[in-house]
Amino acid sequence: MKSLFGWLDERLDVKGLRRALLDREVPDPLTWWHTLGSATLGVFLVQAISGMVLATYYSPSPDHAYASIGYIDGVVTGGALLRGMHNWGASAMVVLVLAHMIRVFSLGAYKYPREVNWLVGLVLLFAVLGFSFTGYLLPWDQKAYWATQVGTGIAGTTPLIGAELVSLLRGGVELGAATLTRFYAFHVLWLPAILVACLLPHLGMVIRQGIAPRPKALEDGAPPRTTDPSYPAYYAPAYAATKQRGARFWPDVIAKDVLIVLLTIGVIVLLATLAPPHLDGPADPTDLSYIPRPEWYFLPLYQLLALVPGSMETVVAVGVPTALLLLLIALPFVDTGSKRNLRHRPWSMAGFVVILGSSVLLMDAAIRARAPVSVAEGGRHLSSTEMAGRALFQTQQCGSCHKVAGVGTSEQGPDLTEVGLHHSSAWMHSYIENPKRFHPDSEMPAFGYPKLSHQEIEELAQYLASLRGHAPAGVPPQFHDTFP
Amino acid sequence: MAADRRTFLKLLSAAGGVAAAALTVIPALRAFASPLASRPGPENWIRLGEASEFDLDVPVNVNFVQTVQDAWVENRVLHNVWVYTEDGENFIVYNGRCPHLGCGFSFDETAKEFRCPCHRGRFDAKTGAVLAGPPPRGLDLLETRIEKGILHASYRDFRAGVPDKIALG
């Protein structure tokens, strides 16, 4: 064993490698926040390993994708657990990458001399979001299909190149077989290649430039701007001084990293066990009643789109992410102040609070907006007549007077959340035709012919009859219909 | 003191690293090795035809199509068996795959024996025993029964290339 090591060392200078990689001195003390990058790397390995096994059972074709996921969940030993780990791991990746970025941002670690690594990190961030977006489609269930329909549709609103962009993403005009193989190829070939190609220099630069220290060590006596000609001469000794306390990468930094990685993976496995991934019904392009929702970390953007008027949609859907990206790219070149602690950088602090705060508020709004849809229709599949009725409910703006499960702009008219439990569709049909026949002082307009056709009123009445609030399926309605 | 601390941190890192790797790799390997856990499926009786209609002393090839679950795909597959009877009462039914490497074999009318075209395996028509060539065991006999004059066989495939007759799932 010793001689084998000696043999290798003679040829490869293993000892030198060890000195350069493991024994190198690091700034001391570092924070626990410094472990977030390693935690991300750890979860990436979980994703790679679980993904390689999942790929052995997955069939990227619309005919078989859904069934092959069912096979993984139902037949493969521990398949549901593995898919759960991959699914929760995806969320963990996004959380950790963002947390890592926030750490780098708040400690000013993107400033001189690490501007380039910040840019590489941005590519990695978008690779991770790309993984998430492409992976979401693969189960080919309802949420996968419709979320991708919307997601690629957003790209289509890009000015000038929208149509071309959609075709490139979807592999055709419509979402279909070519989209699935495309997303699969992106997910298992392109993105891993991009990610690894950026990850290696990302880590290489950390080794070459050293770990960014706590801000304080680089603030005392620093020239006001990192662009000052004297800054490099200030930086080198100030950084070297942080490494004087004898802490080494191995084992001082690695021990902390390993503990956090273990904790993170433990949480992922626990979540995968307690909350196995959900599989919706198979993708059904004809089901117009399905309300797609993106993966949770896209919810702020999703909610933002729900708030802006249609004419502004393009600006927001494409503009906001693009503006954010440009802001992040420009950051290390614009923000050249030598203060690194976020508390000493009022503009950065303000921007950070605004972006994070609005994301949290939007996320909260999106989560609260989720409830009505499921309550109103109880997650049931509507018949085509009921669907037509729901469309009429919207186009006739019934919601401007009636609320359904909390949605609606005023409470001028009665709440209709549970109307299907109290009135028959026949009664509602007559009522909608001419409310004044029932209540002479009713303020509701009559919707009878010529405003709506008999057929349309019937559709509306049948949709309303399907609204049963929280009542469990199978509870018979009790009608109190009184006709004039 | 510092040396003790270092040693402790190294051991901690190693133990933590092993645990983290195990948490990831064990579920992955279990799922990957899932095919090893497959068991033979339930019995699969197929109808071969009127017992009285089979030729005597000449093996007859019977093809049949079955709907099978191939992992997540439902497939229609064509199988074949060879039916041999000397007296019209006792039947021998062979699985139509050569036990050497799974090729389809045929009956040689002049030599009165089964011949596999792939590697020249030869089998006795009456017993399925190996007469010549590389097959490690005789032809695979299937369980049979006659119900209301109809011959049935319990169809199974067996692992090729090994001396023992091992049913596949």
Image (cartoon, coloured by chain):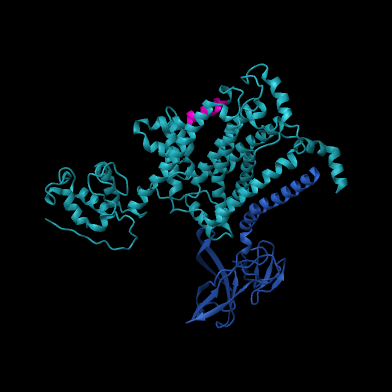
Chain colours: A cyan, B blue
Give yes or no for residue B132 being in the magenta stretch.
no
Image coordinates for residue A465, horizontal then vertical, percent:
26, 55
Q: Is residue A196 left or right of residue A479?
A: right
Region of the chain picked out in magenta, as a range:
A321-331
Q: Residue furthest top?
A: A229
Image coordinates for residue A178, horizontal then vertical, percent:
48, 43
Whether residue A21 is visible, yes or no, is yes
Please tell me whether the stretch drawn in magenta is mainly helix, strand or loop.
Answer: helix
- What residue is shown at x 57% (from left), y 56% (from top)? A81
Q: Is residue B134 left or right of residue A67?
A: right
Note whether A278 is above or below A341 in the view shown.
below
- What residue is shown at x 28% (from left), y 45% (from top)? A391
Q: B51 or A215: nearer the eye?
A: A215
Which quadrant would the C terminus of chain A be assigned to in this image?
Answer: bottom left
Q: A475 or A142: nearer the eye?
A: A475
Note whether B129 is above or below B28 in the view shown.
below
Image coordinates for residue A72, horizontal then vertical, percent:
55, 56
Give yes or no for residue A322 being in the magenta stretch.
yes
- What residue is shown at x 68% (from left), y 72% (from top)? B138
Note whether A443 is above or below A111 in the view shown.
below
- What residue is shown at x 58% (from left), y 32% (from top)? A106
Whether residue A12 is visible, yes or no, is no
Q: Which quadrant would residue A96 be assigned to in this image? A: top right
Image coordinates for residue A372, horizontal then vertical, percent:
35, 48
Q: Residue furthest right?
A: A3
